[in-house]
Amino acid sequence: MYYIGIDVGGMSIKAGVTDKDGNVLHKTVLVTKGEYSAEYTISNDIHALIVKLLSEANIPESEIAAIGIGQAGSIDSERGIINYWNNIPMKNVHVVEELHKWHSCPVFIDNDANVAALGECVFGAAKGIRNMLLITLGTGVGSGIIIDGKIYRGEYGAGAEAGHMGIVMDGEPCTCGRRGCWEAYASVSALIRQTKAAMAAHPESSMHGIARDMGEVNGMTAFKAARGGDETALEVVKQYERYVAEGLISLQNIFRPQMFLIGGGISKEGEYLTAPLEKMVYDGMFDKETGDGIKIRSAALHNDAGILGAAALAIKSL
């Protein structure tokens, strides 16, 4: 039997057929409609993608044991409902019920950060770990929390939004409407703002040449210049790492996980990012004397994290 993992994004939906060991046998993508109504919901696009995937993979639906879906937003996983999603405005979409009009196998849905964390525990860098947090540094700061091998969701599936805990009172404005959220300092969007500010103040920095060569200022600009010894870039990177560590320290002292995983494109920096974070979090950890020290690693599933996380949700839910 096989499993389907579906990763719903703001502009496209990715899907893959996997086996129970996490081998992706075939994957495909569908550009989303982008605008939905009561008559045509995102479930219609997901259904179309499932049909496309099975046709391309030449696998009959009778061989699919279950379908897992990772979806951004507030998700009621028990009832299979998207409560709220702001990227493509939608509320109260009964995805599982709607998909069962076309597909008879079990369907499970959860928040995309939750399933990415579960995928890392089942197939990735946290395999065998029962208590861990995945922090995804991207446009925002996403978080998936695994406690005793299970996803922590909070009431109504709306919990585990670590990016919106405050680290600076009355600080930088956040997209959520508050000020001082961790996301406003530790996201890659924030890093790009920090990089641009440093470049404006230091026209001699090699970050200018790197940005010209890359065609933009992005999350890699300061890191690439810092690796080359640029002093301004080194300070940008050190400050950014302090912002990331500040949130991790709070999460460490609340949850005391065995491991943090860092996801998103910035995680490709590897130990250049995780080693200083590990030291700063250990230094700020309550009760260092008990148990093992904290481990901070890069996530392993990369571009397939959404698909494999959703497949892991299907496998574990069965």
Image (tube, rainbow, N blue to C red):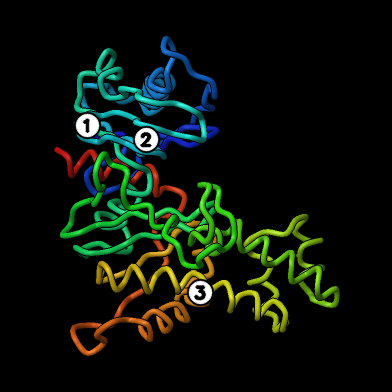
| Amino acid beneath label 3 | Leu
Which image quarter holds the N terminus? top left
Tag 1 residue:
66
Q: Position of residue 57 (x, y in %)?
A: 37, 28
Tag 3 residue:
273
Mark 1 or mark 2, earlier in chain: 2
Q: Is 160 left, or right, of 149 in this rendering?
A: right
Q: Is 250 left, or right, of 189 in this rendering?
A: left
Camera-nearest label, 3 or 1: 3
Q: Residues within 10 Å of mark 3 (few under 14, many from 20)?
A: many
Q: Secondary structure at mark 3?
A: helix
Tag 2 residue:
6
Q: Residues within 10 Å of mark 1 (few under 14, many from 20)?
A: many
| Amino acid beneath label 2 | Ile
Closest to the observer, 64 or 220? 220
Mark 3 or mark 1, earlier in chain: 1
Instruction: Decide: is 108 above or below 114.
Output: above
Residue found 54% across the figure and 27% down from its top: 31
Separation of residues labelled 1 and 2 (CA atoms): 11 Å
Looking at this rendering, what residue extends furthest in the top direction? Answer: 39
Q: Is 269 left, or right, of 72 in this rendering?
A: right
Which image quarter holds the C terminus? top left
Residue found 32% across the figure and 43% down from its top: 158
Instruction: Decide: is 141 above or below 72.
Output: below
Camera-nearest label, 2 or 3: 3
Q: Secondary structure at mark 1?
A: strand
Separation of residues labelled 2 and 3 (CA atoms): 30 Å
Separation of residues labelled 3 and 1 (CA atoms): 37 Å
Q: Secondary structure at mark 2?
A: strand
Q: Position of residue 109 (x, y in %)?
A: 29, 35
Q: Are marks 1 and 2 in contact (CB under 8 Å)?
A: no
Instruction: Decide: is 235 above or below 145.
Output: below
